[in-house]
Image (tube, grey):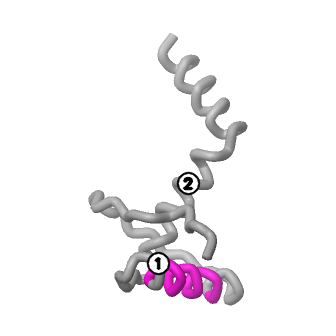
Amino acid sequence: MPKLKITTLSDDKPVKVLTELPAPVHRDLVAYAEALARETGQAIEPTKLIAPMLARFMAADRGFARSKRIHRSASDG
């Protein structure tokens, strides 16, 4: 089985967000949670995966990282 990209969930104070997901995305989210449960031996609520998945996506987006650096340096100077 391939190594999953999400392995641990941080325990930060959450901000509640209400959103709708397309049915195929929800099915994949449930399937990912099931795969992670098999890999780690711990059941995980699929909705708990959304935040780390988004964080990982944004961290891997080089254009977004560059934009954040530019914005941060512009607001600092």
Magenta segment boundaries in residue numbering: 27-37
Magenta span main SS: helix
The x and y percentages for residue 25 are 67, 81
Work out which quarter of the rendered image holds the N terminus and state it: bottom right
Q: Is residue 6 magenta?
A: no
Give 18 or 69, whichever is nearer the viewer: 69
Q: Dot 1: within a 10 Å radius of its alpha carbon, few (fewer than 14), some, or many (20 or more) residues?
A: some
Displayed quadrant of residue 19 = bottom right
Taking the image as shown, residue 18 lies to the left or right of residue 32, namely left
Give 49 or 21, whichever is nearer the viewer: 49
The x and y percentages for residue 15 are 36, 62
Q: Dot 2: within a 10 Å radius of its alpha carbon, few (fewer than 14), some, or many (20 or more) residues?
A: few
The mark tally for this picture is: 2
The x and y percentages for residue 69 are 58, 26
Q: At 63% from the left edge and 46% from the top edge, which residue is drawn?
A: 60
Dot 2 or dot 1: first in sequence order is 1
Give 14 or 33, whichever is nearer the viewer: 33
Q: Secondary structure at mark 1?
A: helix
The residue under label 2 is which amino acid type?
A: Arg
| Residue where numbered disc 1 is placed | 39
Q: Is residue 62 above or below residue 23?
A: above
Q: At 47% from the left edge and 78% from the top edge, which residue is drawn?
A: 39
* Identity of the residue furthest to the front in this view: 1
The residue under label 1 is which amino acid type?
A: Glu
| Residue where numbered disc 2 is placed | 56
